[in-house]
Amino acid sequence: MRNISDIIEGYLKSILEKEQDGMAEIKRSEVAEKFQCVPSQINYVIKTRFTTERGYMVESKRGGGGYIRIVRVRPHSRIDLIEQIVEGLDGGSTQAMAEDIIRRLIDEDVLTEREANMMHAAVHRMTLMSQLPERDLLRSRIMQAMLSALKYEAAGGEAKNQGGSAEG
């Protein structure tokens, strides 16, 4: 059975899918009332499930007329997505960040399930077996190396697609 966080996440994602521009504005209190939970539960879901690593940008305005705006960030290409992620890994990567990035790469059809499983195994804390903060830095360097390999593969595929359409 799904928990309340999963249900709220699904609800918010369904709102985003309905919007043409990939942006939704919600009132925390209204969503909390709908699911008969405390407003902090809505905060928790947004903070943990709508992260930059998962491809979202969140803005909030507090006060009586306040809202929470969730924007789904869509890259122009696979290369843009990979470059954005690599740039975000410069400061290190926690286990949770790595899992979110891998999930996003699956969602954006950049990784297959098999590739994702291999990447996850390579950057898991039990594989790295070193102390913090070195472990997070090592994890980010490994992910950056893997993503760089994917980037060059994607660049070759995109060049072929462009070449094929020009000849078409």
Image (cartoon, rainbow, N blue to C red):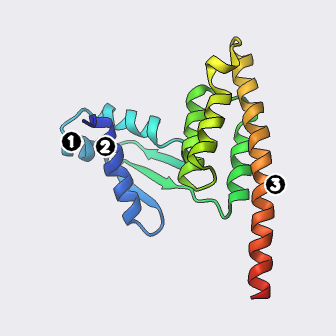
Image marks 2 and 1: residues in contact by CB distance under 8 Å: yes
Q: Residue at x 53, y 49 (%)?
A: 57
Return the residue at label 1. Answer: 35
Residue 17 in sight from this viewpoint: yes
Foreground mark, 2 or 3? Answer: 3
Residue sitting nearer the eye, 115 or 75: 115
- Element carrying mark 1: loop
Measured in 3D between alpha carbons, the distance from the residue under mark 3 to the one under mark 1, in whole angstroms, is 45 Å
**For the residue carrying disc 1, how many other residues have a C-alpha within 10 Å: few (<14), some (14-19), or many (20+)?**
some
**For the residue carrying disc 3, how many other residues have a C-alpha within 10 Å: few (<14), some (14-19), or many (20+)?**
few
Q: Residue at x 54, y 43 (%)?
A: 103
Q: Position of residue 120 (x, y in %)?
A: 61, 33
Q: Pick the quarter of the image with the N terminus.
A: top left
Q: Is residue 150 above or below residue 119?
A: below
The type of residue carrying mark 3 is Tyr
Residue 65 in sight from this viewpoint: no
Image marks 2 and 3: residues in contact by CB distance under 8 Å: no
Q: Residue at x 51, y 55 (%)?
A: 72
Q: Is residue 20 left or right of residue 52?
A: left
Q: Is residue 22 above or below residue 122?
A: below
Tell me which label, 2 or 1, sits earlier in the chain.
2
| Occupied quadrant, residue 80 | bottom right
Foreground mark, 3 or 1? Answer: 3
Return the residue at label 2. Answer: 8
The type of residue carrying mark 1 is Phe
Q: Which mark is residue 152?
A: 3
